[in-house]
Image (cartoon, rainbow, N blue to C red):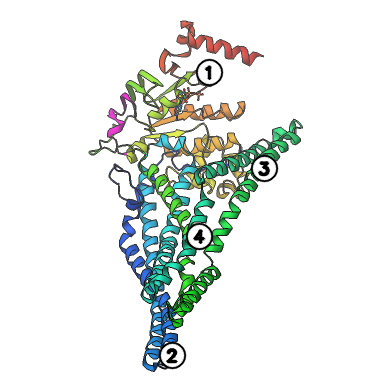
Amino acid sequence: MTGAALADPREGTPDSPSDALVPPEAPAAKAPGLGDLLAPARGRLTAAIVAQAAAAVCSMIPFIAVAELARALLASGGPDESRAWAAAWTAVAALVARLVLYATAGVLTHHADADLQLGLRRRIARHLGRLPLGWFTENSSGEVKKAAGDNISTLHHLVAHTALEVTAAIVAPLTALAYLLTVDWRLTLVALLPLLLGVWFFKQAMSGGEEVTARFFGAMGGVNAAVVELVHGIKVIKAYGRTSHAHRAYDAAADSFSVFFRDWIMSTTRASTSAALALSGPAALLVATAAGTLFVTQGWADALDLVPFVLLGPALTGSVMGLAQSGHAVQGGLQSAREIHALLAVPVLPDPSEPTPPGPDGRVELTGVGFSYDGATDVLSGIDLTLRPGTVTALVGASGSGKSTLARLVPRFWDPTAGTVRIGGTDVRDIASADLYRQVSFVFQEPHLLRTSVRDNIRLGRPDADDPAVERAARAAHIHERITSLPRGYDSVVGEDAMLSGGESQRLSVARALLADAPVLVLDEATSFADPESEAAVQQALSALAAGRTLLVIAHRLATVRDADHIVVLDGGRIAEQGTHAELLALAGHYARMWALQQKGAAR
Ligand SMILES: Nc1ncnc2c1ncn2[C@@H]1O[C@H](COP(=O)(O)OP(=O)(O)OP(=O)(O)O)[C@@H](O)[C@H]1O
């Protein structure tokens, strides 16, 4: 792998960047719904909706005024000039008012939206800053991006646009309806027929919506999975000459999607087209004029009363289709609110109310430590272990025996479910997080580098380190030569002109940890990518580093830790054996068996 640009600012001596920006928040105790999330924007949003409602009323007034104008000019007693002028001026005033109110509503919602986004982003950043570090290893950055980015954009659409669209789509037809009822309530009821018909057809088109949506996402998911499989596996597929097989899987998924889509369109087209037709302007006009003609010829209504229906009839139905679209946006907003809530509901790691500074010596003590990820299965139990300053302790054991979990309890990725972890005599739960991260550096199996210069990557944990210090750390981690061979040396940017191999990325993160200079250093398979030569070099660097520090090293290859001061063998989450290499061999137990196996493997 290349070390390009997978950013985890917490490697090295991590700090909590968001904590630095915003004050701490009370634990997220109550689940916020959409209303809670929108609370900071409520005042402005309400004002905007009121302004938009007034604008919608004003948008109907010119039509009403024109209808009144026609009735004033064509009245049987001759034109009523003053009434006609009043109608004309009312129309002009309403147009101007509409413009002002519409602009006001837009400005208000965009301000409300900006406040809401800022507030939510801060809240999410503050919350992320207080989550256990372990949460970040389990959750992809994609998930965080979705909550903090995409979901907030959806809420933006809801607040800045949909709220106003819905208001206009409801208030404008209601205004027309209220006016028409004053003209002739019987004709108004008839004019509503296309609306009833349209809504009925629309419901037909949407029937079985949930099932159809589920099938839609199922079919779409099939296509996506086939694409991902094709892209991810393309090297293997090609290497084994199975290209046609992969294409067949993709074609099958695409075919199945297109069959579903065609069926769906065929089954809904008639109803949705009928709905669109019933709700269209011409249909409303047709019904109004046909019914009006009947009313007039039967002497039930005056011919002049038809004018308002011709002008305003289409407004009764025109916005219904738009409302359906807005309904989707509201659904999306609710879903986004649920997802943001789910993120905000992830329990935070409690900060000590009265932090105690750790003692200076970097001694790490685990007493009666137990841990479970799911609250049911113990991954670690009964761990009593002391890591002494100036020594290297190696954790070894079969895959899944709990090595990484144990190591990650030291920098408080999670809190133990039983027992205590102490650094310098202080329970890690009582140490302020910034202090804790100054005490413990760690290097992961997967090196995480930021898309910034090599220099800044190395001094992530000590931003004030000068260039000679950065270079010393790089030399000690045996990466200096490689860096100077890059196009811009230490100024080369990772992922741009610094394309580093897995081993090189790992040595860069070792340099970062060396520079951070914390008294406790946790190395999770720090040399797993390295070739034998550079592995030996990194081992030497690490041994030098051990002087005066407490080192905890996780290793699969026992040869890399045979010189460790203390080797701890984990088995099923418990300490099975501990001692030096020689002592453990003499025990002829787990370690001796693992050693013999690995020696045999190496000899082949
Ligand atoms: N984030 C997690 N959520 C749930 N279970 C986990 C998580 N991480 C690890 N586990 C489980 O905890 C147990 C111990 O895992 P851990 O990674 O600590 O072992 P390990 O000895 O470091 O393994 P390896 O050598 O393969 O890295 C395993 O059964 C693993 O499946």
What's the amino acid at mark 2? Answer: Leu
Provide the residue designation for mark 3: 254
Earlier sequence position, callout 4 versus callout 2: 2
**Please, what secondary structure does the residue beneath circle 4 have?**
helix
Task: Give the alpha-carbon distance from disc 2 to disc 3, as whole Å.
Answer: 64 Å
Provide the residue designation for mark 1: 558
Mark 4: few/some/many CA within 10 Å (<14, 14-19, 20+)? many
List the single residue furthest toward the front: 298
Front residue of 575 and 225: 225
Residue 181 place in picture, x, y as percent: 37, 72
Label 1 lies in ligand 1 vicinity (Cβ under 8 Å):
no
Q: Where is 558 relative to 404, above or below? A: above
Which residue range is magenta in the image? 416-432
**Please, what secondary structure does the residue beneath circle 2 have?**
helix
Would you say 384 lies left or right of 601 here? left
* Residue 549 makes an appearance in the image: no
* Residue 303 makes an appearance in the image: yes
Earlier sequence position, callout 1 versus callout 2: 2
Would you say 218 lies left or right of 22 here? right
Earlier sequence position, callout 3 versus callout 1: 3
Asked if the stretch drawn in magenta spans residue 106, the answer is no
Provide the residue designation for mark 4: 198
Provide the residue designation for mark 2: 73
